[in-house]
Amino acid sequence: MTPARQPYRNRIELFQGTLDMLILQTLQRGPMHGYGIAQALRVRSAEILQVETGSLYPALHRLERRGWVASEWGQTEQNQRAKFYRMTAAGRRQLAQERAKWETMTTAIAGILDPAVES
C-alpha cells in the first residue's frame, strides 16, 4: 500500500444522511464556521470521523437549502472572514426526527449483532 493511501486504510463510511444529523447535532452548541464543524466532529468522535471539505460543504449547502441551517459571514478568532452556520427552528425539529430514527435503527442493528438477544 502506498503511503499516500495510508490515511484511508481505516476509513469509515457514514450511512446516508448521517452527516446531516451530525452537523445539526454539532450546531446545537451554537454557530460555527465549516472548519470548526469539521474539527468538532473529529474531536468529539475521538479522531475517528474526519469529514473532508468535499463532503462537509455540500452537506452544509444542502442543509441551508432545506432551511435547517442559516448562514452569515463573520470573523473567526484569527480575524479571518468565514461563513458561520447556525441551526434554525426547522433544523432543531429535523434533528429530533433524525435522532429518533437513528435510535430505532441502532437498537435494531444491536439486536441482530448481539447473540444474547435471541427471540
Image (cartoon, rainbow, N blue to C red):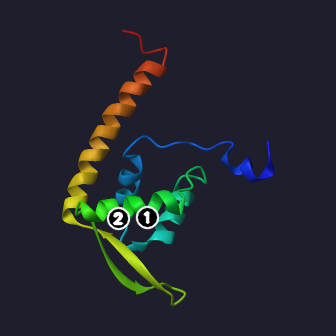
Secondary structure, mark 2, is: helix
- Quadrant location of the N terminus in the rendered image: top right
Q: Residues within 10 Å of mark 2 (few under 14, many from 20)?
A: some
The x, y position of residue 12, in whole percent, is: 56, 42
Q: How far apart are labels 2 and 1 at the CA level?
A: 6 Å
Query: Image quadrant of residue 26?
Result: bottom left
Residue 7 vs residue 1, the one in the foreground: 1
Residue at 52% x, 42% y: name it. 13
Q: Is residue 5 visible?
A: yes
> Residue 76 bears which disc, if any?
none
Answer left or right for 119 relative to 11. left
Residue type highlighted by circle 2: His
74 in relation to 97, above or below: below
Q: Are marks 2 and 1 in contact (CB under 8 Å)?
A: yes
Q: Residues within 10 Å of mark 1 (few under 14, many from 20)?
A: some
Residue at 40% x, 53% y: name it. 22
> Residue 57 bears which disc, if any?
1
Residue type highlighted by circle 1: Tyr
Q: Is residue 28 visible?
A: no
- Going by the picture, which residue comes out furthest to the right? 2
Query: Image quadrant of residue 89?
Result: bottom left
> Which residue is denoted by mark 2 in the rendering?
61
Answer left or right for 43 relative to 9. left
Residue at 46% x, 66% y: name it. 37
69 in relation to 99, above or below: below
- Quadrant location of the C terminus in the rendered image: top left
83 in relation to 110, above or below: below
